Amino acid sequence: MTATETPVGGTAAGVRPWAFDADGHVVEPASIWETHLAPEFRGYAPRVVQFDDHFRFVCNDRIGFRIHARVESMGAPGQTAHRTSTPTAVRGATDPAARLDDMAVDLIRAAALYPTYGLMVQGVTEREPALALCRAINDWMAEYCAHDPAHLVGVGTLPMADAGDALAEARRCVEELGFRGVWRRPEHIEGTPHVQDEVYEPLWSYLEEAGVPFAVHPGLNGVVPVDDLRRRFGDYFSAMHAAHFVTEQMLALTTFVAYGILERHPGLRVAFLESGAVWALSYLHRLDEHAEVFGFEQGGLRLAPSDYFRRQCFVAVEEVEPGLELMLAEYPESVVFASDYPHADGTFPGSTSELLASETLGDGVERILLDNSLRLYGLDQLP
């Protein structure tokens, strides 16, 4: 179904699914480490320890902070501990056939898929286990997507410990596994190269040439270091969660602009996910102002920061945020839709309902729910 045929303003019985979810998730089963990870690295695999009133993630010798919920909430949309003490996980978290059924409920035709436990493995800084963990995640993701590769779109997890390994795994994900993008976390973790380091230039060039995007995706679990947040908030999960995502995305966007990555690689598409969209409107104004007043001398910029963003960058919304119509007016091709299915802070059923019912966004609804995601992932149309 083309964008011009899409229903706007609400759902209707019998309507063929047509939307493109730019950021959904799977929840990898515990068996992934037995089937896809060499025995010598299994001690690094993230796992969950459930207590009476909370659970913690554990990865190698690092134990995460308390998360006051049941572990089932990882795969239970809308069922945070604040709302229920007995979350029920949806089957689509691990079962691709069930996921396609759930997607159809919300008129989603295709979904780009990111991991859940994969959000934890990038805290491993030892080179060999870091790569092995990412390869295990990607191999299982490929099996999941193989159920219907036209509508389940894999996005590859890259190791952060070594830029050369990140490039090699990106090639494998794109050329062997058929993924339509790759991603990493936004943080700089001690002992790993910075995103702006020259060692990452071959990765940006490869992705630019291959025509697949690079996504920056945060997560909060306690086994990936967030020491500054913990010093400020202790182990107050909801306070850390509120601040972490958008703060890290501002830092990541600054890096891609201020160090000239977008200037040197004009064909590289970069998505800053799971943090909303409207934050970028005011922050890009601030970056433009700093470029004018102070300059970004290490970036060699020939455009304003906002122009690079408009040309190459994307942010994702899960709802009609205040000011979204202003963001769309300024950056009409840069906002995509994300369901965050099946995580507890996502919505299902009804992930697309608020956008579809909007009376203020006009044709921006089609852009958000379909057109811009096609542009992000380098696709002409959905099958």
Image (cartoon, rainbow, N blue to C red):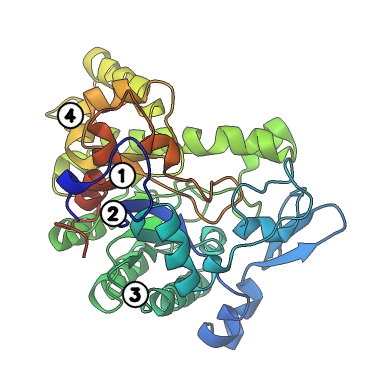
**What residue is pinned by disc 3?**
148
Q: Position of residue 269 (x, y in %)?
A: 23, 48
Which residue is more in the foreground, 94 or 266?
94
Answer whether labels 2 and 1 touch (C-beta < 8 Å).
Answer: yes
Q: Position of residue 40 (x, y in %)?
A: 60, 84
Q: Earlier in the sequence, mark 4 or mark 3?
A: 3
Give the foreground label among 1 and 4: 1
- Residue 20 vertical position relative to residue 40 in the rendered view, above or below: above
> How many C-alpha atoms fall within 10 Å of the one at disc 2: few (<14), some, or many (≥20)?
many
Query: Gap between marks 1 and 3, in whole Å?
Result: 20 Å
Query: Gap between marks 1 and 4, in whole Å?
Result: 23 Å
Camera sees residue 299? no
> How many C-alpha atoms fall within 10 Å of the one at disc 3: few (<14), some, or many (≥20)?
some
Give the foreground label among 4 and 3: 3
Number of numbered discs: 4
**What residue is pinned by disc 4?**
307
**What residue is pinned by disc 1?**
369
Query: Gap between marks 2 and 1, in whole Å?
Result: 8 Å
| Mark 3: amino acid | Asp
| Mark 4: amino acid | Asp
Give the foreground label among 3 and 2: 2
- Mark 2 lies on a secondary structure that is loop
Q: Earlier in the sequence, mark 1 or mark 4?
A: 4
Residue 18's disc number: 2
- Mark 4 lies on a secondary structure that is helix
